[in-house]
Amino acid sequence: MLNSLKQTGRNIGHEIGRTWENLSEGWRELLSRSSDALTHFARNKDEKQGEKGALATFPQWSLLAGEVEETGKEIVVRVELPGMEKDDCSITIEGNILYLSGEKRFERDTDDSTYHVMERAYGAFQRTIPLPRNVDMEKAKASFKNGVLTVRLPKEGAEAARSIPVS
């Protein structure tokens, strides 16, 4: 009986160790890959919050996952904006920084419900995305499809390579 109890204790300890290791690995990856995607959502103090103040208990931070891809001719930035429409966001470029700002609005079908899980953030946000090089802002194009904003930025001086004679 005592050996059985000791073995059970070792098994539980082993499982707790594995769980902690997996949790730690997940946090490390989240921090290393997504730290720039962590975005603050500020709420307007005058917003209607419903009878129970549901909006006040929603998170103020959320991930706006994105990617920056470079091809031979352009920089392509994609950012996931779930629950938003194209008119909810605006883009500004200064030098080699892309600023994405907007607002995710809280909509509720009924006031007589109770939330049990609140993981979505609402409010105004701004996300700063560094670009790997300067771009031609005049030729930039943006599109929005299925909750993903895609910004295509031609690289400055992206013409084909040419030889320069030495005199």
Image (cartoon, grey):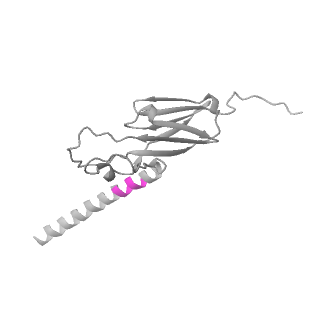
- Looking at this view, name the residue that lies furthest to the bottom: 2
Residue at image x 59%, y 30%?
A: 140
Q: Is residue 53 magenta?
A: no
Residue 63 in percent (x, y) is at: 41, 46
* Residue 117 or residue 108, whichever sits in front: 108
| Residue pictured at 47% horizontal, 33% vertical | 149
| Residue 115 located left or right of residue 29 | left
The answer to whether residue 51 is left or right of residue 40 is left
Assign the magenta stretch its main secondary structure.
helix
Residue, x 81% and y 31% (percent of image)? 164
Q: Which residues are magenta?
A: 23-28
> Which quarter of the image is occupied by the C terminus?
top right
The residue at the far front in this view is 46
Q: Residue furthest right?
A: 167
Is 53 displayed left or right of 43 in the figure? left
Q: Residue 164 versus residue 75: which sits nearer the camera?
A: 75
- Most foreground residue, 141 or 161: 141
Please provide percent x and percent y for residue 133: 63, 40
- On the image, the x and y values in percent for residue 47 come to 37, 46
Placement of the N terminus among the 4 image quadrants? bottom left
Q: Is residue 27 magenta?
A: yes
Q: Position of residue 34 (x, y in %)?
A: 45, 48
Task: Name the image quarter holding residue 91.
Answer: top right
How many marks overall?
A: 0
